[in-house]
Image: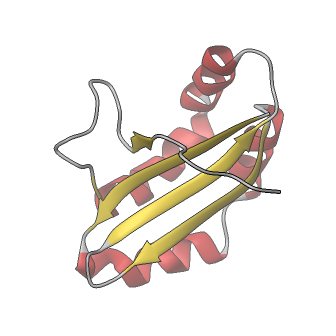
Amino acid sequence: MERMGMVIGIAPEHIAEYKRLHAAVWPAVLARLAASNVRNYSIFLREPENLLFGYWEYHGSDYAADMAAIAADPETRRWWTFCGPCQRPLDSRAEGEHWAAMEQVFHVD
């Protein structure tokens, strides 16, 4: 299992909409995440900085293929058309990233 942490900004005027969307994530989007071996997925909001912190655990053996399957999924892509306009990617993110990956520096069970 691999733990993943990521961060992105959120436009303050879209926080209520983002919360509303995530209060009822579409079943097809959740099913695609599960099929791609993503478990224990959480998103946290930090105000007033307007940052979203995402955390998930990856339980698969081919991360690139599983992420490609998520990115190719029509319902997930449609979901992103609603969520994407709310988000503000960080200028410091790596090439090709939307959410900026974070380094895990501590964990305890």
Residue lying farthest to the left in this orientation: 91
| Front-lying residue, 35 or 95 | 95
Residue 37 placement (x, y as % from top left): 80, 34
Q: The C terminus is located in which quarter?
A: bottom right
| Front-lying residue, 75 or 85 | 85
Residue in the picture at 34% in, 68% down: 51
Residue in the picture at 35% in, 40% down: 98
Query: Would residue 10 be found to the left or right of residue 79 on screen?
Result: left
Residue 89 placement (x, y as % from top left): 26, 49
Q: Quadrant of residue 86?
A: bottom left
Q: Quadrant of residue 74?
A: top right
Residue in the picture at 51% in, 46% down: 78
Answer above or below: position of 101 versus 65: below
| Front-lying residue, 80 or 38 | 38
Residue in the picture at 74% in, 48% down: 28
Answer above or below: position of 93 versus 79: above
Residue 34 placement (x, y as % from top left): 81, 42
Q: The N terminus is located in which quarter?
A: top right
